[in-house]
Image: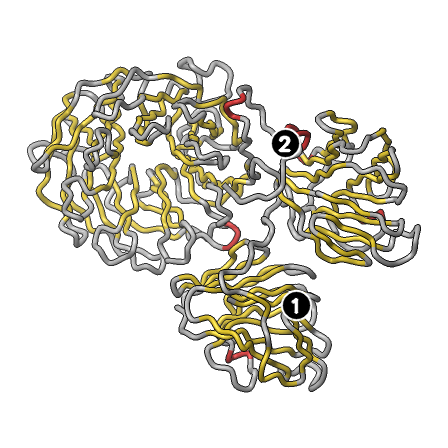
Amino acid sequence: MRPHTARSFPGLLVALLIAVSSTAFAQPAVFGPAAVYSSAPAPGAAATGDLNHDGRPDLVVANTQSNVISVYLTGAGGTLGAAVTYAVPASPRDVELADVDADGHLDAITANGATLSVLRGTGTGTLLAAQSFPAGPAQDPASAVDAVVADFDGDGRPDIAAAQRGFHDAVSIYFGNGDATFGNQVSYIEGDTGPSNIAAGDLNGDGHPDLVVGLTTVRHIRIYLAQAGRTFAPGNPLLSDINPARAVIADLDSNGTADIAVACSVGTVEVYPGNGNGTVQAYRSFPASGASGCGSATCGAARWLSLADFNGDGRQDAAVANATTAEATVLLGDGAGGFGPPISLPSTNYPSAAVAADFNGDGLPDVALTHGDQPTNTGSRTVAVFLNTTSGEEDMAVVWTNLVNTAVNGATLRKTSGCDGCFDAGAYSQQTIGAGAVGGVGFPFTVAPQLRMVGLSASAAGTSPAALNYALRLSNGVVEIREGGTYRGDFPAAAGDQLSIVVGAGGVVRYLNNDAVVYTSSVVNSAALRAGALFAGAGGEVAGVVLMGSSGPPPPPPPPGGGNVTWSEGVNVETATGTIRKTSGCEGCFDAAARSTQQISGDGSLEFIVDDPDPVLLAGLTAAFGSGSPSEIDYGIRIQNGWAEVRENAVYRADVHVQAGDVFRITVTAGIVTYSHNREVFYTSADPATFPLFAAVTIAEIGASISGVTIG
């Protein structure tokens, strides 16, 4: 769960809740629109993992009609790069990621029918050619349709277990040699039961992974308990709904023992509570689709199931691919082994797989879909990512920036100068509610004669009432609704009333007094928004303003030992504690610079605030400071014309948009350097840090400055 510091506003939270009927699921889960990417034909099974060591999970997809797998490397903001395909011997039915050769890089393992393949990872995001070996019992080669990787014999080397279809259906375990090869196969003949999927997890608490196999022909699941000597004890088949398509093992009721969840083609998710000894209780069934008829054979077929905590409440939730209803769904867990009603993630195609991973690095798991099933059986060629925009269960205190004739004292923003009666004072939040995201602003009403306005702004610039797209104008006991300065209506308010403006699904904006909606705007929002407060009357103030759904939490304190930078070796600059400004020298030349007296000798960070996003300057960390040349700064951020570029020894690495008041941090953790913009990591360096590191700033344009510089 994200850290938050302010109390919740009931009206703001209620307005943002998705339709969940039980109070057990009171914490919402919200997702943005799908980002769609092209794929080779019929993308099916998928897996996620960091293939290039950049700290971001990448996506690997098995293309069942193409004899290839596709690798999508994840970029900044959770975007996927173009697919790179790698050949396998036949149509891959499943793909897994694990380090099977002990080189520290993830490898891809595929089940291709008659073969299993290993594509060794290089650590750079690329894979080597497939190394393949036969699948199935030696006496009866079979078609491997699903696989799972785990250390089944406890020797520290990953092994493969596969569900296989053939003349004699089977479950086979291939024991790893630690070098991407496998031998000493053990097989268990299933008969004509139709094993179609397989999962691994410790069901009896003995420290060894057991197996759960979905048997679609006989509509059962079977547990295989791991035994000594590389053997398993098959249990009796357990009744399931129609076609158990995907099983996972996890503790769903928080009692310390593993449970089993199964996606079934009848359109349900079944949960078998574990007893902790390798046995389970009778299953409970939960609808997996919001489509009409769910729970019957006509409902969307639940083909894939992944578990993650999507709403930050500490409970396991489920993402389900429903193959015949053109949707994926998220089911919120109740912490007691059950799931709430399905939340739809609409899709224009028919999904085969739904996998969870934090693609954009915001601490919340997102959902990726593969679209490989359509009623016409022509296949599909897309992959979609839904970014998780869920906010925390508490609201987020606004951090004010772009202050004009105002000052901040704790949670209070107050007009301190300017014309009495003129709207010439204000400020905007550092945090942003993303375009298309659900969010809002809330605050307690105070009775005062000064005219004040609080609202949401797309431009976050200026002190004119027109700058607030959606706003509440406050004076004494009357609240006016203003949009772009235009009057829409008014309502009475008393001291302590909780006022809020909420952007809901589809960009619909509502105004609330406590829990009651008082006005719904006819102007649909599609832009990113910041909170804003404007003042006319001298001494006017607002306090306790909070955001829900913002993309960045308030800045955490500096790391232990951190503090304002003090400067040395300054040339053509004016410095004070935590600030630096170019005062002389050549206009446009990097001939003004200074470095910190403090240094980082291990984990630590440099942080600064952008005063003006246009003048050219470079701030960062350096091991050797001499002339102030940009090439001397090992890990830097260059500000110029509204952009912030990552520059390492002057070499460009990445960039983001920037505006005045934005906060940048360069963090070193265990020698790995990351770059954050308003608390969101947007780049991870491939160059390990060398110590000690000093803060350094070099400035090209006279008058350019940064402030709030801390190091520690």
Verify CB contact (< 8 Å) between mark 2 and mark 1. no
The span from disc 2 to disc 1 (Cα, nearest Å) is: 35 Å
- Work out whether residue 571 can be spotted: yes
| Residue closest to the eye, 432 or 583 | 583
Image coords of residue 124 (percent x, y)? 35, 60
Q: Which residue is mark 1?
A: 707
Q: Residues within 10 Å of mark 2 (few under 14, many from 20)?
A: many
Q: At 31% from the left edge and 22% from the top edge, which residue is drawn? A: 273
- Work out whether residue 375 can be spotted: no
In the picture, residue 371 is in which quadrant?
A: top left
Query: Residue 328, labelled with which disc?
Result: none
Image coords of residue 442 (percent x, y)? 71, 38
Give above or below for 547 relative to 123.
above
Q: Which amino acid is tagged 1?
A: Ser
Q: Which residue is mark 2?
A: 13
Image coords of residue 433 (percent x, y)? 64, 45
Image coords of residue 35 (percent x, y)? 53, 43
Q: At 19% from the left edge and 38% from the top edge, which residue is drawn? A: 114
Q: At 69% from the left edge and 86% from the top edge, which residue is drawn? A: 586
Q: Which amino acid is tagged 2?
A: Leu
Give above or below for 10 relative to 77.
above
Disc 1 on helix, strand or loop? strand
